[in-house]
Amino acid sequence: MTTKSKTHLEEIAIGMSAKDRETMVDSLNGLLADLTVLYIKARNYHWNVEGTHFFSLHAEFEKLYTALSNDIDLVAERARALGGIAAGTMAQYLELATLKEASGVPIATAMVSELSDDVERIVSNLRQKVGEADDAHDFGTADFFTGLMEAYEKTAWMLRSYVR
């Protein structure tokens, strides 16, 4: 999925093999896809939430998609820093993502529950990606993944706390 030729990947002398960087770019693109699917879902729910918790959920969904927007940019830039191409189309995102798009507009509590499940999946995926980055001797990306994992663990906890 890197879509960059191996020649381009080999041109970068940052102490990692082209193969390891390609592996990491693929991993980053998988994360980019999941974060983008989650971003679209949070936007959808922000626009369409109704009910007694409208004001609080509308604001929380906005906080979530705003944070996701920032993280999406950081993930894409990390892929570029390693010499790869960041996925950038909806078709690519849907092909690479482990998360599924929202189907319709659920009730408010189901929105929070779905977002909670998705964030927990991202945390689980990030935990695995940290190990993959370590194996590739890409300690910068491992650190990057760890920081994201910690942030999303807090987000998952907060979302879970709402629906329990």
Image (tube, rainbow, N blue to C red):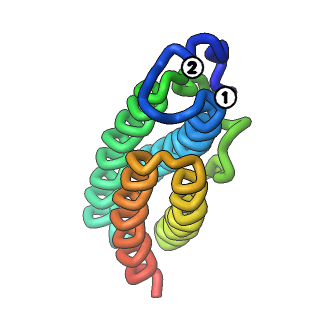
* Residue placed under numbered mark 1 in the picture: 92
Residue 59: x percent and y percent?
Answer: 26, 57
Residue in the picture at 51% in, 14% down: 11
Question: Relative to 137, is 32 above or below?
Answer: above
**Depth order, front residue of 119/164:** 119
Q: Quadrant of the N terminus?
A: top right
**Depth order, front residue of 63/79:** 79
Residue 105: x percent and y percent?
Answer: 58, 54
Q: Amino acid at mark 1?
A: Gln
Residue 139: x percent and y percent?
Answer: 42, 50
Inter-mark Cα distance, 2 to 1:
20 Å
* Residue placed under numbered mark 2 in the picture: 9
Q: Amino acid at mark 2?
A: Leu
Q: Is residue 107 visible?
A: no
Question: Relative to 117, is 162 above or below?
Answer: below
Residue in the picture at 54% in, 65% down: 127
Q: Nearer the viewer, mark 2 or mark 1?
A: 2
Residue 19: x percent and y percent?
Answer: 65, 32
**Depth order, front residue of 27/159:** 27
Residue 7 tag number: none
Residue 83 falls left or right of residue 64 = right
